[in-house]
Amino acid sequence: MTRHRPETPVDPDKNFFGDNFEVDALERAIGIPSWEWPGRCFDVTRALLRETGLDGHAAYGLWTGPVVPSAFFDGKDAQVPHGWIVTAEGLIVDPTRFVFERTAPYIYCGPNDFYANGQTIDWQVTAPARHAKAPGQPRNQRAIKRRVRVRSLTRTAQRAPK
């Protein structure tokens, strides 16, 4: 199995996987085999956090790194929506990075090299300064929260006994 050893040491006492980040240990912990992980990055990330108690938070944004030809996301846009974990120490833990590299499954733990957190990164980089928004919650994030709230209320109403 291929593993990336981070240059920044990971404290084994704060990490379920110790210093070995084993794929088979994660498969057993979350109940999802690694061959089902491609395309389910955020599911695997959330399950890893839930089942292991890893000190960090789930992040969703864009993979801006290379995608190897014939990999799962080959032929997609240069930036692929992706999910990963940011630890309290600022390291990236990505259990599904291997899908971009077409390697054997491994769990990446290392620096933030190809991860752009949040879908608004492109706008911030490419927007002219005169269009910069004032600090605060972007309009699209408020709309997303409204939709989520409406969906959850709708689901609750559908499940309620009649």
Image (cartoon, rainbow, N blue to C red):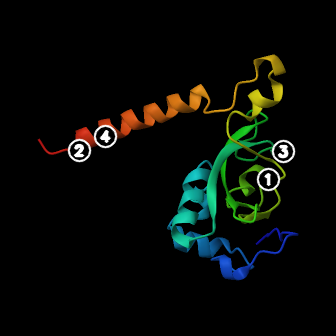
Give the residue displayed 82% in from the left and 47% down from the top: 68
What residue type is disc 3 on? Pro
Q: Nearer the viewer, mark 3 or mark 4?
A: 4
> Which residue was labeled with disc 3?
66
Ranked by sequence position, the earlier of labels 1 and 3 is 3
Q: Secondary structure at mark 4?
A: helix
Give the residue displayed 75% in from the left and 40% down from the top: 74
Left or right of 36 on screen, residue 111: right
Across and down, in percent, residue 122 comes to 76, 31
Q: Secondary structure at mark 1?
A: helix
Report the disc number at residue 159.
2
Report the disc number at residue 101.
1
Report the disc number at residue 155.
4
Tally of marks = 4
Ranked by sequence position, the earlier of labels 2 and 1 is 1
Instruction: Tell me whether the residue at label 4 lies in contact with that at label 2, contact meaning CB atoms closer than 8 angstroms.
Output: yes
Q: Secondary structure at mark 3?
A: loop
Q: Nearer the viewer, residue 135 or 131?
A: 135
What residue type is disc 2 on? Arg
Across and down, in percent, residue 118 comes to 68, 40
Give the distance between the C-alpha atoms of the residues marked 1 and 3, in whole angstroms. 8 Å
Quadrant where the C terminus sits is top left
Q: Nearer the viewer, residue 144 or 3?
A: 144
Q: Residue 62: name its quadrant.
A: top right
Give the distance between the C-alpha atoms of the residues marked 4 and 2, in whole angstroms. 6 Å
Left or right of 2 on screen, residue 154: left
What residue type is disc 4 on? Arg
Instruction: Tell me whether the residue at label 1 lies in contact with that at label 4, contact meaning CB atoms closer than 8 angstroms.
Output: no
Q: Nearer the viewer, mark 2 or mark 3?
A: 2
